[in-house]
Image (tube, rainbow, N blue to C red):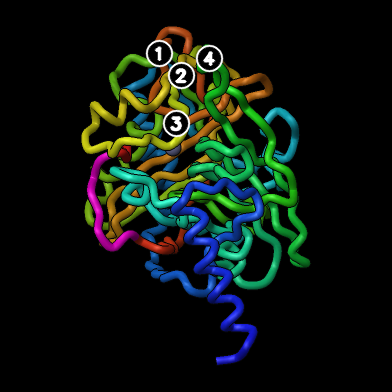
């Protein structure tokens, strides 16, 4: 063992001790991306034209006005969309990191990851766009927070970060949305990303207005795809705008001192808001767990105001309006899957 390796190991042990003693340190380093377990499986990729018809009929059961098209992706870096690259094309991949078992029942604060290094390892050389939903880098804010991830990594490893955290602040327990700087590429605990080359190309464009059914927008798509494709696992990712109406969304409070064992304890700990549009929601959905202990859907949204958080459903069926741009993923990369797992906290 080299001296460098010994020093690194001592440093890692000290870091773990500091975490366990709740010593808050914004310089705390992420786990080494090369030492995590990576598993990869291919996903079934139906043609976009077939998905267009499937989604049109699925969504018509839940919304009064539905249009699904296969169209060239608009420039998603325009401010009305807000992504950090222009398209959703090139090596479309779902990436799931960690999981709810690292948060519940007790937080494992050493589960801090470097998104840049993990995306690079999963995607190889070239530029990368990564968008999705996870736990924010708590050392940056000195508190637990939501992460709304939206970053591009150039072929030379330069970061353009359009990500945000959303946290609970003040005695009124208000929601505070704050941009993540380019220098910060960590997330904590769990993450669902749609990762690609950010290239232009065809996507599924979906417009829905006026909800007539009981399912949320993403659940409706996911369950409909499962009904159609059954044991073939299909995954989508990208962006949806909640353009009108409001959404029921949560923001995690700071880490709970007492363990959380049930959905009802979880819902006591989470802080829920009705957040108004326009919300820009990024994330992924997949039709089943694919023997990888996957989270089936996960979208977080940011806004141009103070709002940001985890999407559950809209609360304004008469006035709701969604506009979505999704691409179909060809594979799933599962990173640092929890060894002991449970199924709660995945709504
Ligand atoms: Zn979430």
Callout 2 touching callout 4 (CB < 8 Å): no
Q: CA separation, marks 4 and 3?
A: 15 Å
Which residue is situated farthest in the top direction here?
318
Indicate the quadrant where residue 177 lies.
Answer: top right
Q: Say whether residue 222 is left or right of residue 148.
A: left
Q: CA separation, marks 1 and 2?
A: 6 Å
- Inspect the magenta stretch and tell me whether residue 171 lies in it: no
In front of the other: label 4 or label 3? 4
Query: Front-most of 284 and 113?
Result: 113
Residue on which the image places disc 1: 315
Sooner in the amino-acid sequence: mark 2 or mark 3: 2
Residue at the image position 63 percent from the left and 36 percent from the top: 164
Which quarter of the rendered picture does the N terminus lie within? Answer: bottom right
Which residue is situated farthest in the bottom direction here?
1
Relative image position of residue 87 (x, y in whole percent): 66, 48
Sooner in the amino-acid sequence: mark 4 or mark 1: 4
In front of the other: label 2 or label 4? 4
Q: How crowded is mark 4: few (under 14 residues within 10 Å), some or many (20 or more)?
A: few
Q: Say whether residue 330 is left or right of residue 267.
A: right
Residue at the image position 55 percent from the left and 50 percent from the top: 187
Residue on which the image places disc 4: 171
Vertically, is 284 above or below 317? below
Residues rendered magenta in the picture: 338-344
Residue on which the image places disc 3: 252
């Amino acid at each position: 063992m080299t001296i460098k390796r010994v020093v690194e190991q001592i440093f890692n042990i000290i870091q773990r001790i500091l975490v366990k003693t709740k010593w808050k340190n914004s310089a705390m380093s992420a786990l080494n991306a090369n030492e995590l377990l990576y598993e990869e499986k291919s996903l079934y990729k139906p043609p976009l034209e077939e998905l267009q018809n499937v989604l049109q009929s699925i969504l018509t059961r839940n919304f009064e006005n539905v249009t699904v098209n296969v169209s060239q992706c608009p420039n998603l870096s325009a401010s009305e969309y807000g992504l950090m690259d222009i398209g959703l094309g090139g090596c479309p991949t779902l990436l799931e990191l960690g999981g709810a078992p690292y948060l519940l029942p007790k937080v494992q604060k050493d589960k801090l990851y470097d998104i840049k290094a993990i995306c690079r390892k999963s995607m190889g050389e070239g530029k990368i766009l990564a968008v999705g939903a996870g736990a924010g880098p708590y050392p940056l804010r000195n508190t637990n927070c939501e992460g709304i991830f939206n970053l591009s990594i150039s072929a030379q490893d330069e970061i353009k970060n359009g990500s945000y955290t959303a946290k609970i602040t003040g005695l009124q327990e208000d929601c505070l949305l704050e941009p993540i700087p380019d220098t910060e590429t960590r997330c904590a605990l769990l993450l669902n990303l749609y990762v690609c080359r950010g290239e232009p190309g065809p996507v599924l464009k979906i417009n829905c207005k006026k909800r007539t059914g009981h399912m949320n927008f993403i659940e409706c798509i996911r369950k409909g795809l499962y009904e159609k494709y059954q044991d073939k696992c299909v995954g989508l990712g990208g962006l949806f705008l909640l353009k009108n109406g409001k959404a029921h969304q949560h923001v995690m409070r700071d880490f709970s001192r007492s363990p959380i064992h049930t959905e009802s304890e979880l819902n006591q700990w989470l802080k829920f808001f009705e957040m108004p549009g326009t919300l820009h929601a990024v994330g992924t959905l997949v039709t089943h767990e694919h023997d990888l202990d996957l989270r089936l859907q996960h979208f977080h949204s940011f806004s141009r105001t103070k709002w940001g958080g985890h999407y559950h459903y809209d609360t304004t069926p008469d006035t709701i309006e969604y506009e979505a741009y999704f691409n179909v993923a060809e594979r799933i990369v599962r990173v640092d899957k929890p060894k002991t797992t449970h199924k709660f906290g995945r709504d």
